[in-house]
């Protein structure tokens, strides 16, 4: 560790030597990556460019040819594990790994890693169906991520335009295998996700070996696809192939052609469906008009509408009949009441004192109005008032009692 400042900066030589000293203390390490370049120069040394598939980074590795010969033949873009010691060259300021052992990662080991990653992502819910986004019926623009000048691109574009001629594409041609695939596909996916006019994104490539399709099972790419808000259609390889991108995508297409059929409708089917709906609507309107016409005809056939005054005239007759009946009933009730009144009057008259007077009787009263009932109570000379049937007169008592 050395001190430096703006007044006393460290020379480049000192810095590079300090880096070399630090790296010399660092022991050998195991490094995993993908071989993007392999150069076996004349002599005894071979040079390798070891690349990380998830980011655009690489390291320079050199080794004796006997080390690389132990794992040859290596397939293109082979994934390897290297046991190496870091070396720093002070003259040009470069870092190189000196490989002591190289091991190729076998298919079985890769499958085990993919299965473990698959289980991890599944536990996190990245494959859950409720996270899937529905594909639009007719996208404004389709984002397409594919290889450069590939059959997969042609299959998607030609089949989509055959189904819907005016469909638009935003195409990103990238590496779909090898060390650069993950970086380029991820970058293209970010660009299309940021495009507001892109309503759906198709990621496609043709078939290939297990190693060729490994970039589409990369954890960083799968997690990036999981957070995209634009629906993603995965059409990687053939139907039997199943990279992890298929599981996180909103729709998994078996082939590029299937992806094109899924993202755009067939214009002929849509026109036929529209015609069917139009015919159904026309029949529905015609049936409704016929029904209402029949109802109107039924209403018009009713007597009240054929002769509108009939309702009034029938009510006039009913009212007239009721009025006549009321008059007769009222007259009868008056007649009966008059008879009853006459009878009551006769009865009252027969019981009245006037009737008695009319028969010749009279009522004798003293001067104070007291009625005389016993002649013995009278005295001679008492003034009496006689009430007769036709009036009153006066008399004087003689005092004599007869009978």
Image (tube, rainbow, N blue to C red):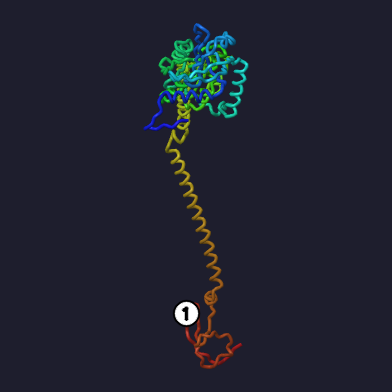
Is residue 16 shown left or right of residue 105?
left
Vertical arrangement, residue 299 with respect to residue 356, above or below? above
Task: Count residues near mark 1 (Cα–Cα under 10 Å), then give few for <14, some for 14-19, many for 20+.
Answer: few
Which residue is label 1 attached to? 391
- Residue 372 appears anywhere in the view: yes
Between residues 248 and 276, which one lies in front from this camera angle?
248
Residue 197 location, quadrant = top left
Q: Quadrant of the C terminus?
A: bottom right
Element at badge 1? strand
Residue at 50% x, 83% y is 386
Residue 90 in the image, given as x and y percentages of width and height: 45, 20
Between residues 349 and 231, which one lies in front from this camera angle?
231
- Residue 177 appears anywhere in the view: no
Residue 80 in the image, given as x and y percentages of width and height: 56, 16
Vertical arrangement, residue 195 with respect to residue 388, above or below? above
Between residues 294 and 145, which one lies in front from this camera angle?
145
Residue 98 in the image, given as x and y percentages of width and height: 53, 16
């Amino acid at each position: 560790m050395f001190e430096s400042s703006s007044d006393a900066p460290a020379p480049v030589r000192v810095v590079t030597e300090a880096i070399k000293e630090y790296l010399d203390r660092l022991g050998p390490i195991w490094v995993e990556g993908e071989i993007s370049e392999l150069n076996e120069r004349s002599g005894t040394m071979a040079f390798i460019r070891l690349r990380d598939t998830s980011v655009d980074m690489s390291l320079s590795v050199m080794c004796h040819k006997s080390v690389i010969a132990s794992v040859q033949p290596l397939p293109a873009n082979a994934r390897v594990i290297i046991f190496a010691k870091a070396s720093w060259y002070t003259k040009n300021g470069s870092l190189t790994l000196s490989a002591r052992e190289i091991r190729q990662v076998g298919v079985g080991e890769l499958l085990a890693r993919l299965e473990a990653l698959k289980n991890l992502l599944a536990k996190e819910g990245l494959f859950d169906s409720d996270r899937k986004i529905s594909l639009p019926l007719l996208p404004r623009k389709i984002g397409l991520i594919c290889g450069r000048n590939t059959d997969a691109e042609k299959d998607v574009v030609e089949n989509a335009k055959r189904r819907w001629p005016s469909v638009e594409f935003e195409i990103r041609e990238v590496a779909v295998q090898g060390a650069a695939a993950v970086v380029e596909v991820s970058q293209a996916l970010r660009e299309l996700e940021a495009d507001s006019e892109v309503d759906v994104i198709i990621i496609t490539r043709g078939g290939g070996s297990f190693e060729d399709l490994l970039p589409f099972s990369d954890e960083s790419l799968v997690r990036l696809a999981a957070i995209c808000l634009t629906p993603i259609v995965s059409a990687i390889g053939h139907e039997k192939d199943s990279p992890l991108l298929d599981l996180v995508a909103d729709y998994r297409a078996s082939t590029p052609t299937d992806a094109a059929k899924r993202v755009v409708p067939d214009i002929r089917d849509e026109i036929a469906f529209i015609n069917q709906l139009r015919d159904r609507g026309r029949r529905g309107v015609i049936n409704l008009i016929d029904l209402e016409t029949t109802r109107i005809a039924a209403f018009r056939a009713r007597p009240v509408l054929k002769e509108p005054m009939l309702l009034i005239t029938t009510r006039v007759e009913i009212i007239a009949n009721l009025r006549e009946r009321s008059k007769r009933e009222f007259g009868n009730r008056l007649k009966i009441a008059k008879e009853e009144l006459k009878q009551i009057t006769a009865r009252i008259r027969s019981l009245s004192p006037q009737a008695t007077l009319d028969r010749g009787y009279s009522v004798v009263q003293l001067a104070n109005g007291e009625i005389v009932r016993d002649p013995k109570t009278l005295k001679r000379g008492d003034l009496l008032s006689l009430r007769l049937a036709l009036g009153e007169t006066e008399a004087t008592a003689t005092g004599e009692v007869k009978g």
